[in-house]
Amino acid sequence: PFVVTDSCIQCKYTDCVEVCPMDCFRQGPNFLVIVPDNCIDCSMCVPECPVGAIYNEIDLPPEQRHFIEINARLAAHPEWTPITRSQAPLADHENWRTVANKLEFLKL
Ligand code: SF4
Ligand code: F3S
């Protein structure tokens, strides 16, 4: 499956959700994830993300591999709900889009 990684945190542009034929995306307050069991590896979401946050699991950079487990875990979180229509990015997205290692800011 495909995996959402660090760059999405605190930005959440949501362009990705519109193109997914399987409605894979689930959202929390400042990040979203892909339901691994629903993803058919079509790759349509990848070019939609303006910060390049989405990878095929097999192409993940080593420093992003922990997001496989994070996507799977948060996809099952009862308060992380489906999102299929894009919405405005988070208010402070411009200040966060080039920041790395944002996991400590992830809200559940
Ligand atoms: Fe959806 Fe395709 Fe992206 Fe998987 S790869 S999350 S099926 S758009
Ligand atoms: Fe996140 Fe990129 Fe989608 S920032 S919400 S993965 S378009």
Image: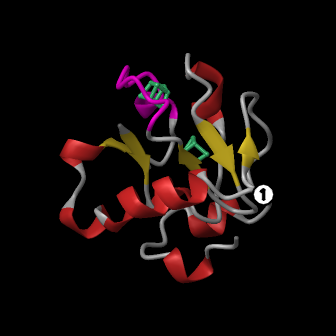
**What residue lies at 48% left-to-right and 29% top-to-bottom?**
45
Q: Residue sitting at 48 percent across and 72 percent down?
A: 99
Q: Is residue 38 above or below residue 65?
A: above
Q: Say if the magenta span includes residue 19.
A: no
Identify the amino acid type marked 1: Glu
Where on the picture, by quarter, is residue 86?
top right
Query: Considering depth in this image, is 87 or 59 the residue closer to the camera?
Result: 59
Residue 99 vertical position relative to residue 53 in the rendered view, above or below: below
Check if residue 42 falls in the magenta segment: yes
Query: Where residue 62 sits in the image (x, y, percent)?
Result: 19, 64
Label 1, ligand 2: CB separation under 8 Å? no
Horizontal side of 56 relative to 88 (left or right) equals left
Q: Quick check: 89 above or below 107?
A: above
Single out the residue that lies furthest toward the top: 21
- Give percent across and percent down for residue 33: 55, 49
Q: Identify which residue is drawn at 75% across, 46% down.
A: 81
Q: Residue furthest bottom?
A: 104
Element carrying mark 1: loop
Is the stretch drawn in magenta largely helix, strand or loop? loop
Q: How crowded is mark 1: few (under 14 residues within 10 Å), some or many (20 or more)?
A: few
**Residue at the (47%, 48%) spot, across then down:** 51
Q: Can residue 52 be seen in this view?
A: no
Left or right: 31 in relation to 43:
right
The N terminus appears in which quarter of the rendering? top left
The residue stretch that appears in magenta: 37-48
Q: Which residue carries the number 1 mark?
A: 79
Q: Is residue 74 depicted above or below 54 in this figure? A: below
Determine whether, in the image, residue 52 is placed left or right of residue 85.
left
The residue nearer to you, when weighing 47 against 25, is: 25
State which quarter of the image contains the C terminus: bottom right
